[in-house]
Amino acid sequence: MAQARSARIIADTLGALAAPEAPVVLFLDDLQWFDHASLNVVRHLCSDLPAHVF
């Protein structure tokens, strides 16, 4: 539960920093080495935020 909350906080923070005229670009390298918590962050970024943010 704490990991899910942390993932949501990170996704919400990145979403607050981005705007349609200034999207955020993330470069994710070596995804095969991501732990479960890191994958949850990526999952939240891809599913919960509007498409124009990233």
Image (tube, rainbow, N blue to C red):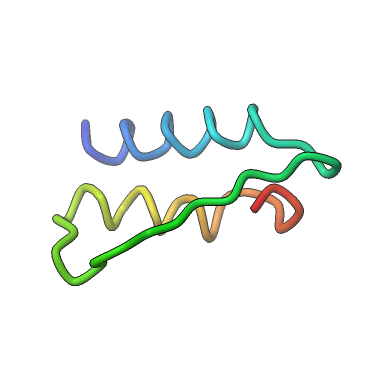
The answer to which quarter of the image holds residue 24 is top right
Left or right: 17 in relation to 7: right
Q: Residue at x 25, y 50 (%)?
A: 38
| In-image side of 1 versus 8 (left or right) | left
Q: Is 25 displayed left or right of 29 in the figure?
A: right
Q: Position of residue 47 (x, y in %)?
A: 54, 59
Q: Residue at x 69, y 47 (%)?
A: 53
The one nearer the camera, 31 or 7, is 31
Residue 31 image position (x, y, % from top left)? 26, 67
In-front residue for pair 23/43: 23
- For this orientation, the residue located farthest to the bottom is 32
Q: Is residue 54 above or below residue 9?
A: below
Can you say whether 42 is above or below 19 in the image? Answer: below
Residue visible at 28% across and 57% down? 39
The quarter in which the N terminus is drawn is: top left
Where residue 18 appears, x then y in whole percent? 69, 36
Q: Which residue corresponds to the image point at 18% horizontal and 59% vertical from the top-left?
A: 34
Question: How many numbered badges does the structure rendering display?
Answer: 0
In the image, residue 46 above or below residue 19: below
Residue 9 lies, in percent from the top left, at 42, 29
